[in-house]
Image: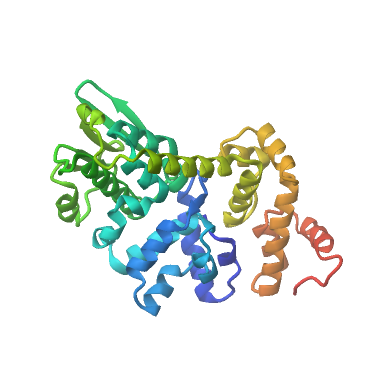
């Protein structure tokens, strides 16, 4: 995915960024869970953006503003979070997650971490993760396979990412999960086994120093395996009131994702995330996890239609590209998904009928 604003840079530096992120975009196949809370973004920025130069480098290309960072209700797209991860990896190396213990604390996962720690037992903690994990971290889905002796949490990535991006994100997941288990057990979960579906990195010894020696790379899937008996472990931090409040917040967040207005926002963010061209209604329905009929109905309930949203996004892109002046008329038409430049000309006249078109 490529943020639309990046396409608009006419300078050679801007075009270089475009080429870089077009390559990244080709790897991203499933855009289903675009909305992402700003909590992780803020925390990573606080951990590593300790100078003005580093802060600027971490924010580069994310299109996240200081105003957004101050807004407790703001969210971002998954692309923006991934862009930040790429920036931090470039600045601090592949082992950056291990340098920030603040990211390991269950509280860094917001209501998901609170519910996990305050749950009555480990089985309830895992149920919270499998039911609501995607609300906080839309780049994976989890499932539990329970066996007589061993049980396993499988982490399925919802986007196809380069290992340099996916590995630190899974490191955060695994370290956070281990911290949660340790809180429930009030001891080190030495028997837990961690499987990474990636090649072993140079910093694997540091990973094992945090997760323990039972860490394997090159696995079929990202997974955590642990004794099934652990599921019955009662949490010493169980708090029925806190647990209930956190669950309510997670349920509300999930409902917002699938409400008509929430779906409209997800569709708008999806359209904005495309590097060029456009998607059909059927493709958007698939990527947002609903049927086309549901997409049409819920957008209608939100006071709009799919064609209206596409038209609004194309108009906004056209205005920026025309104002920027770095592309020809034919190039802009192609960037907007028009196979015939004359069709773009008609749309341009319609869009800017009542005001001068940018030039």
The C terminus is located in which quarter? bottom right
Asked if residue 353 lies left or right of residue 339, the reply is: right
Q: Is residue 21 visible?
A: yes
* Lateral position of residue 237 relative to residue 186, left or right: right
Identity of the residue drawn at 15% across and 41% down: 214
- Between 229 and 5, the one lying in front of the other is 229
Q: Which residue sits furthest top?
A: 148
Residue at the spot x=56%, y=43% of the render? 257
Q: Position of residue 245 (x, y in %)?
A: 44, 43
Q: Position of residue 108 (x, y in %)?
A: 35, 54
Q: Note whether residue 94 is visible.
A: no
**In this picture, residue 347 sits left or right of residue 76:** right
Above or below: residue 209 compared with residue 236 = below
Expressed as whole percent of the image width and height from the top left, the position of residue 192 reads 19, 38
In terms of depth relative to the viewer, which is nearer, 20 or 42?
42
Residue drawn 26% across the image and 49% down it: 175
Residue 259 position (above or below residue 333):
above
Task: Name the residue located 67 percent from the left edge and 64 percent from the top edge.
Answer: 331
């Amino acid at each position: 995915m490529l943020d639309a604003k990046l396409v608009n840079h006419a300078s050679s530096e801007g075009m270089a960024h475009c080429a870089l992120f077009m390559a990244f975009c080709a790897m991203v196949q499933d855009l289903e869970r675009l909305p992402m809370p700003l909590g992780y973004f803020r925390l990573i920025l606080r951990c590593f953006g300790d100078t003005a130069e580093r802060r600027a480098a971490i924010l580069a290309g994310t299109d996240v503003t200081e105003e957004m960072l101050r807004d407790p209700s703001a969210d971002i797209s998954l692309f923006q979070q991934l862009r930040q991860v790429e920036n931090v990896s470039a600045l601090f190396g592949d082992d950056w997650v291990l340098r920030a213990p603040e990211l390991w604390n269950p509280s860094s996962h917001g209501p998901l971490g609170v519910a996990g720690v305050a749950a009555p037992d480990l089985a309830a903690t895992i149920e919270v993760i499998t039911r609501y994990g995607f609300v906080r971290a839309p780049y994976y889905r989890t499932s539990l396979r329970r066996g007589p002796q061993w049980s396993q949490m499988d982490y399925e990535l919802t986007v196809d990412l380069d290992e340099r991006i996916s590995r630190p994100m899974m490191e955060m997941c695994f370290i956070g999960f281990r911290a949660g288990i340790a809180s429930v057990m009030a001891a080190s979960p030495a028997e837990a086994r961690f499987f990474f579906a990636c090649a072993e990195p140079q910093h694997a010894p540091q990973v094992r120093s945090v997760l323990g020696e039972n860490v394997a790379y090159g696995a079929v899937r990202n997974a955590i395996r642990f004794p099934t008996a652990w599921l019955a472990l009662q949490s010493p931090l169980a708090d029925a009131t806190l647990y209930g409040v956190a669950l309510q917040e997670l349920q509300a967040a999930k409902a917002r994702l699938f409400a008509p207005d929430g779906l409209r926002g997800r569709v708008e963010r999806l359209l904005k995330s495309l590097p060029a061209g456009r998607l059909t209604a059927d493709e958007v329905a698939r990527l947002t996890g609903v049927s086309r009929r549901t997409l049409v109905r819920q957008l209608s309930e939100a006071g709009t239609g799919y064609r209206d949203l596409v038209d609004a996004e194309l108009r906004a892109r056209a205005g920026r590209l025309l104002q920027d002046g770095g592309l020809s008329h034919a190039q802009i038409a192609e960037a907007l998904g028009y196979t015939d430049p004359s069709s773009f000309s008609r749309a341009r006249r319609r869009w800017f009928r009542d005001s001068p078109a940018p030039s």
